[in-house]
Image (spheres, grey):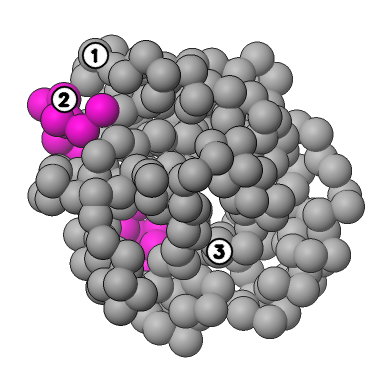
């Protein structure tokens, strides 16, 4: 039985996977999916978010130890979560059996304007300012991260924001951690699959392409999905993961 650790990105929590986590577990029958919250997000919103990705790795490992879920793990991670996976695999390669990295970007492989595309700077600033209405924030996030823009997810997202709001300080700490993180130039020993979205408005797909070229690992490009690829086309993600595992 493979144990899959699911990690989300900046300020998002494990429940933002929606139905995808259960569908993934059903598609890969016999596997176990364990969605984790990064410190400062979701049910851990009262904790301080680390300013270093390495400290996020330590927290994830401690969470799993408390739950008696032992390695090795397969990791499926998005954005900041993917940086956590890469750092985890670098320091503890015996713990990460394989990793699937979705729409991520890392120094030193991509310039800042590809890692966070300039067209979104103004919108991100508006939603980060104090006093922004929760519904306006979630609508803006949906607009930036999804090409399907299915508004039916908004009530659930609003409920999560109201139940476990992420503090401005924790959001800043996570942004700093992502900006500071530098991935190893040497290819990871952990088998790695990169998935990217052609129409990702937040992070350019070129970032995944650059990582794949540097690390000589496979990557797949979705033709129309946005940054939240599992939200826009979960079945495509599952099919690509299954195909990769079958050839591994």
Q: Would you say residue 77 is visible in this rendering? A: no
Q: Nearer the viewer, residue 17 or 125?
A: 17
| SS class, disc 3 | loop
Q: Residue 223, image x and y in percent?
A: 65, 15
Asked if the magenta segment contains residue 189, the reply would be yes
The residues bearing labels 1 and 3 have C-alpha atoms spaced at a distance of 31 Å
Q: Which numbered circle lies on residue 187?
A: 2
- Which residue sits at x=88%, y=52%? 152
Q: Which numbered circle lies on residue 119?
A: none
Q: Which numbered circle lies on residue 13?
A: 3
Q: Residue 213, image x and y in percent?
A: 28, 13
The residues bearing labels 2 and 3 have C-alpha atoms spaced at a distance of 29 Å
Asked if the magenta segment contains residue 36, the reply would be no
**Left or right: 34 as drawn, with respect to 18:** left
Q: Earlier in the sequence, mark 2 or mark 3?
A: 3
Q: Nearer the viewer, residue 110 or 113?
A: 110
Q: Is residue 161 above or below residue 248?
A: below
Q: Are marks 1 and 2 in contact (CB under 8 Å)?
A: yes
| SS class, disc 1 | loop
| Residue span colored magenta | 171-191
Report crowding for label 1: few under 14, some 14 to 19, many 20 or more residues within 10 A (C-alpha). Answer: few
The quadrant of the picture occupied by the C terminus is top left
Q: Is residue 117 above or below residue 169?
A: above
- Which residue sits at x=53%, y=79%? 43
Q: Residue 91, image x and y in percent?
A: 11, 49
Q: Which numbered circle lies on residue 216?
A: 1
- Which residue sits at x=66%, y=35%? 234
Q: Nearer the viewer, residue 53 or 4?
A: 4
| SS class, disc 2 | loop
Q: Earlier in the sequence, mark 1 or mark 3?
A: 3
Q: Earlier in the sequence, mark 1 or mark 2?
A: 2
**Left or right: 80 as drawn, with respect to 140:** left
């Amino acid at each position: 039985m493979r144990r899959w650790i699911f990690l989300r990105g900046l300020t998002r929590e494990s429940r933002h996977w929606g139905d995808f986590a259960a569908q993934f577990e059903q598609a890969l029958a016999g596997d176990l999916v364990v969605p984790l919250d990064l410190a400062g997000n979701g049910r851990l919103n009262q904790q301080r978010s680390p300013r270093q990705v390495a400290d996020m790795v330590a927290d994830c490992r401690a969470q799993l130890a408390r739950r008696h879920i032992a390695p090795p793990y397969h990791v499926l991670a998005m954005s900041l979560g993917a940086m956590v996976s890469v750092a985890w695999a670098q320091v503890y390669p015996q713990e990460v059996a394989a990793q699937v990295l979705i729409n991520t970007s890392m120094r030193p492989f991509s310039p800042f304007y590809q890692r966070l595309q300039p067209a979104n700077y103004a919108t991100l600033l508006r939603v980060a300012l104090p006093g922004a209405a929760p519904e306006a924030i979630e609508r803006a996030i949906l607009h930036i991260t999804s090409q399907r823009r299915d508004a039916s997810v908004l009530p659930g997202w609003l409920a999560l924001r109201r139940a476990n709001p992420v503090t401005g300080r924790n959001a800043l700490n996570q942004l700093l951690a992502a900006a500071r993180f530098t991935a190893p130039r040497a290819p990871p020993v952990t088998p790695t699959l990169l998935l990217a979205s052609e129409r990702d408005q937040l992070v350019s797909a070129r970032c995944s392409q650059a990582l794949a070229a540097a690390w000589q690992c496979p990557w797949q490009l979705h033709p129309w999905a946005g940054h939240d690829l599992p939200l826009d086309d979960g079945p495509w993600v599952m099919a690509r993961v299954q195909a990769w595992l079958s050839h591994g």
